Amino acid sequence: MAENVAKDVKPLRDNSQGERRPFTLTELKKIMAVANGEWRSIIVFGLYTGQRLADLARLTWQNLDIAAGELQIRTAKTGRRVRIPLCKPLADHIESLPSSDDPKASLHTRSFETVSTHGMRVLCRASSVNC
């Protein structure tokens, strides 16, 4: 076949995996111990904002309103506009990031390029994250 006839068929949800639970402090420490700079940053953003990996990978400087102390995004999954207050640890982390004069510059360059060019599944495979 020249074309995948099932390409538009969405997989059924598998609810047999049980309930989700938050990471323990020990698990978070182990994750942070092996995370490189960009992944460490994405983990910190995820920890303090609760946003999905795709939304964090697409963050740009224009998503941050430092004066108001908030992160402003439109979520990819629902399309909703979300304003999230920046807690002190996240604000401190943001101050440690290399900044740009271009508001459209990404915060997580490699992840931003990967998601923009190849989509979310490639980022998940590259990071061994279950998306």
Image: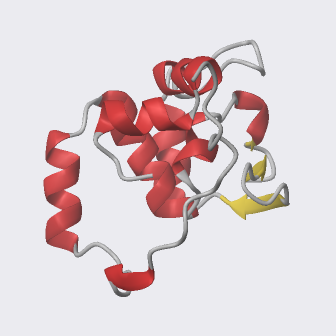
Extreme top residue here? 101
Residue at 57% across, 28% down: 115
Q: Is residue 49 visible?
A: yes
| Residue 25 % position (x, y) | 21, 72
Q: Is residue 12 left or right of residue 15?
A: right
Position of residue 37 in the picture relative to residue 104 (left or right): left
The mark tally for this picture is 0
Image spot of residue 21 (x, y percent):
34, 82
Residue 121 spot, x, y in % from top left: 48, 37
Spot the residue most to the bottom: 19
**Measuring 72% from the left and 55% from the top, which residue is drawn there?**
77
**In percent of the image, x 36 and y 53: which residue is there?**
130
The image quarter containing residue 64 is top right
Viewer-nearest residue: 51 or 78:
78
**Scheme of image coloration:** secondary structure
Q: Is residue 21 visible?
A: no
Horizontal relation, residue 48 to residue 6: left or right:
left
Q: Nearer the viewer, residue 106 or 55?
A: 55
Percent across and percent down for residue 63 are 76, 39
The relative height of residue 106 versus residue 88 in the rendered view (above or below) is above
Q: In this view, does 129 lie above or below 58?
A: below
Q: Is residue 49 above or below residue 63?
A: below
Q: In which quarter of the image is the N terminus?
A: top right
Picture residue at 73% right of the left edge, 12% below the top: 101
